[in-house]
Amino acid sequence: MFKKAGLILFSSLIVLSCKHEEAPCTPSTEAINYPSSDSLAQVLNWPKDLKITGFSGPDLTPSPACMAVAATGEVFVGVDMMGSLGKEINKGFIKRLVDCNHDGIMDSHTEFAQVDNPRGILAIGDQVFVLHTTFSPETGKAFNMDLVVFEDLDKDGVADGPAKVLIKNLSNSKYLQERGTDHATNGIQMGIDGWIYIAVGDFGFHNATDRDGTQLTMLGGGVVRVRPDGTEMEVYTHGLRNIYDVAIDPFMNIYTRGNTNDGGGWNIRFIHQIQSGEYGYPVLFKHFTEEILPALVDVGGGSGTGSLYMNDNRWPEKYNNVPMMADWGRSYLYFHRLTENKASFIQDEEEFIQLPQITDVDVDGAGVMYLSAWDGAGYSGSPDKGYVVRVTPEDYNYEPFPILEDFFWTGSLVDLLKADNAKTRLSAQYELIKRGKGADKVWQLVEDSTLPLEVRAAGIFTFAQLASAAGIDRLVSLTEDPQVQEFALRALSDRMGSIDNVPTEPFLNALKSDSDRVKAAAIVGLGRLGKKEVAKSLLEIPVPNSFQAPGMGTEGPHAKPNAEIIIPHLAVKTLVKLDAVDACVSALNTEQKDLALWAMRYMHSPKAVDGLIKAYEKTDDSVFRNKIINTLARIYHKEAPYDTSWWWSTRPDTHGPYYKTVEWDYTPVIRSFLKGEWEKTSEEEKELYAELNSKYRLAIDDFGTVEITAPKEDMPAIDLEKIKNKKGQIGEASIEDIMIALKKIKGDPEKGKEIFKTQACFTCHSVASGEVMKGPFMGQIGSIMNREHIAESILKPNASISQGFSTVQIQTKEGDNYVGFVTQESATDLTIRNIVGTATQLKKSNIAERKELETSMMPSGLVNALSYEEMASLVAYLEQQK
C-alpha cells in the first residue's frame, strides 16, 4: 500500500513538473519586422484597458487570410497572396510563429506547410487542420477545395509530410476557376462535442466526399460538420450567404456573420445557428420568410470574416462570454451581448477593436489573443501588406500552458476540464479522447452539480465520446437532471454509429419540458433517431400566429428574432427527415393540421398529394381549403438536382421557393386538380389562382398572373466587351465584380485625367505639388497604393483609410470645432480644409483636442454613373501618379 501511494505521489510530482515545460524553441537571429503598435494606436480606436502590440509584419505574414493559435501559444497564419480574386498559384503557405520566452515578442518562425488559398485553420494537439483550394498541376487552374490535416510529431515547426485529406471537393470548381475564392468554403472550428464545424460560403459544393465515402451536395451556403478523422460528414444548417467562420460557445451555440444578397445591399446578418435550421438564402429569405429561422439582426453593410467565442475568465468581464466577430469591410472586431430568449437569443452589437480589414481572431491556452489584418492587401493579395497583432488585458500575467502529452496521470487531464476557459477544456478533451481513457473519472465530474454548467457540459460531451454505446444508460439517467438535460439529449443523439441503441422515451418526455432549449434538443434528436412513430407527438406542437407569409411581392423580416417560431420550425424539419407522410396526412383531419400542412410543403410524395386532395374534398372550410391549395402549389415543382453548372451569382434570383424548378411524377396530378378547381370558381375567386401562379411560378397560362415586384434575375456571366462602356454599371455592380472587370480592362490614363476633372475630383484633391492643397494629395498615390487599393478607396472610402487620408476633428481651447483634412502643418501651425474647400489656419498651441475620425469625408457613390471602361481609366490615371 505504501509503495502504491508513493508511486501515485511520484507520478503527481512528475505531472506538476511537466506542467511548466515548454516545447523547444530557437529564437531567430534575423531582423524581424514588427508592425508599429504605437503608430496604429494613434489612428485606431483601441480600448484603453488592453495592451495591443505588433507580433508579425508583412515580411513574414503578408495577406493573412486566416489564423489559428494552438493552446501552447504557437500562431499559425494562413498567408494568401493570391487573395480572393487572384488566379496565380504557389502564393500561399502556413507560417508558424512562436514567442519563445512569452514576453509578447515573436522570436521564431517557420514555414509550416505550403498550401494555396488557405481559408481556415484549426491547431490542436499535434495536428493542424487546414481548409484550402487545390489546383491542377497540369492546367494550373483551381480544381476544388479540401479539408486536410497536417501533423508535426517531432515539434520542429514544419509539417512532417504531405497532408491527409479528410474531405475532398468541398466547393464549386466552376466558380473557383472563373472567379476565385471570395464566396467559397472558409473557416473551421472545433466544438466541445468533438466535431469540426465548417463555414460553407454560397458557392456551395457538389459531391463532397469524406474518408468513409459519404457524399453531400449543397446548393448555397451553410454549416457542415465532420469528425476529426474525416468521417461522419453531415449538414448542420443551410441557407447562408458567404459566411467566413463560425464562433462556438461552451454550450454548443454556434454563431455566424454572413451577407445577404449582393443585390440587396451587401448587408450583414448575425445569426444563431440551430441544428437542422433553414436560414433561407437565397430562395426563401425574401418572399417565404415564414419558412425560415430569422437572423438575430441585420447590422447593415459589411463583410464578416473570422470569429471566436471568448470564454476566458482571465479577461475582463465586459469582454468575456461573448461571440467576437471580425468584419473586414468595417475594419472592426465586434462582439454581441446576448440575452437568452427561449431557444435562442436577442443581441446587442458593440464595437471592440478597430483594425484595418481584420481577417481573423483566436486565443491561446494562456489567454493571449491574436488578430490578423489584411490592411490594404487588395482583392488579389499583396506581398507587402498585412500583419498580426497580440492583445492582452492591461494587467495580464502570463501563466504557461502545460504540455498535455507529458501528463502521465489521466486524472490530471480530467481536472483540466474544470478550467475557467474554453481553450483549456477543449485541449484536455482532445488529449483524453486521443488516449481513449478516463471515462469513469469524467463521469464523476459530470455528476458534480456544484461545478459550473460549462464544465459539466464539457464533461458530458467528453464522456459521450469516450464511452460511446457503453455510456448510453448513464446519459439517459442524466436526462432526469434539468440542469444538464439539454446536453445529455444532444450527446445521446450526436453520433449515428450508436444511435440504434438510444431509446426515444427521454426525448419524448423532454417535449413536455418548460425549457425551449430542452425541447429543441429533443426535437432535433428525434429526427436523428429516425423512428417514425414519434411523429404524432411532434404534430402536437402548435403553430404560432406569427407563421405568416409576407404579402405578395414584399420582403419578409429575415433578420428579426422570432423565438416562438423555432420549436415548430425544428419539428417540421424532423417530420420531413422522418418522411412522416402518413402521420401528416392523418393529422389533416385534426387540430394538428396546421403543422402537418407546413411539413407537407416539403413532401414530394404521391401519398402527400393524394392526402391533401382528399382532405380538400372532405371539408367545407374555405380557409382550410385555401391552405391546402397553397400547399399543393408549393410542391407543384421541386428543386432540380444541383451539379454546380447553373448556380451562383452575386445577384441571384431571390423569388423562390426553388432556384431551378423541375416537374416531378405528381406535377400533372396537381396541375389537373388546380385547373379543375379554378374552373369552378367565380371571376373574383380566380384572383387566388393568379396569385399562386405568380408566387410559385407555376406557369399555368389559364390562371393569369398578378403584378409583383420583379425579382432580380440570376445575373449571367459578364461579357465585358458588350457592357464595358455601359453608363452606370459601377453603381449596379458588386465591388468584387468591379475588381474582376478592372483586371481585364486596363483603361486609358489620358481619358482618366479628363474623368478626374469631370467628376470634380480636383475639388478636393490636387495632383501637382504646385497646386493649392485642398485635401489628400494625389500626386504620389500610385506609389503608396496598388490598383485595387485605389479602386477600393474610391468605391468604399471608409473600408481602409490610409494614413494621411483620414478626416481630422479639431477642437480649439475656445471651443470652436473644425472637421476636414490637414493640408499643411509645421511645428507651430496647421491648415485644415473642410469639405467645401474653406481653409482655416490654426495655432497648434491653441488646440485642445485633435483626433482622427473613423469615417472618410469622401462620400461613397461618387462614381456610380461611370462605366467599367471609365472607372478603369480613372484608376489608370491615378496609378501613374508616383
Image (cartoon, rainbow, N blue to C red):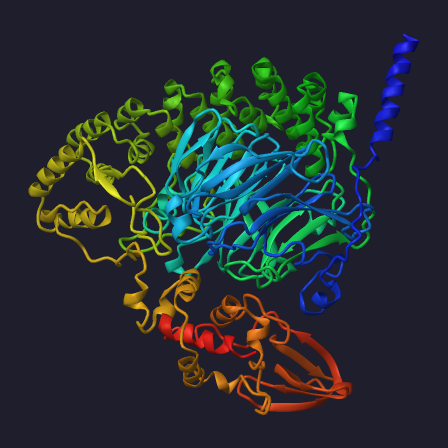
Q: Nearer the viewer, residue 36 or 8?
A: 36
Question: Image quadrant for the N terminus?
Answer: top right
Q: Residue at x 59, y 47 (%)?
A: 93
Q: Is residue 142 left or right of residue 44?
A: left
Residue 743 x, y percent position in the rendering: 43, 64
Quadrant of the image occupied by residue 398: top right
Please determine whether, in this image, residue 409 is positioned above or below residue 770.
Answer: above
Please determine whether, in this image, residue 493 is positioned above or below residue 272.
Answer: above
Residue 360 x, y percent position in the rendering: 61, 51
Residue 164 x, y percent position in the rendering: 55, 32
Q: Nearer the viewer, residue 67 or 80?
A: 80
Q: Is residue 17 left or right of residue 239?
A: right
Q: Nearer the viewer, residue 138 or 828?
A: 138
Q: Residue at x 47, y 24 (%)?
A: 212
Work out which residue is located at the far right of the displayed protein and give it. Answer: 2
Quadrant of the image occupied by residue 253: top right
Question: Image quadrant for the C terminus?
Answer: bottom right
Please determine whether, in this image, residue 415 is positioned above or below residue 766.
Answer: above
Residue 558 appears in view:
yes
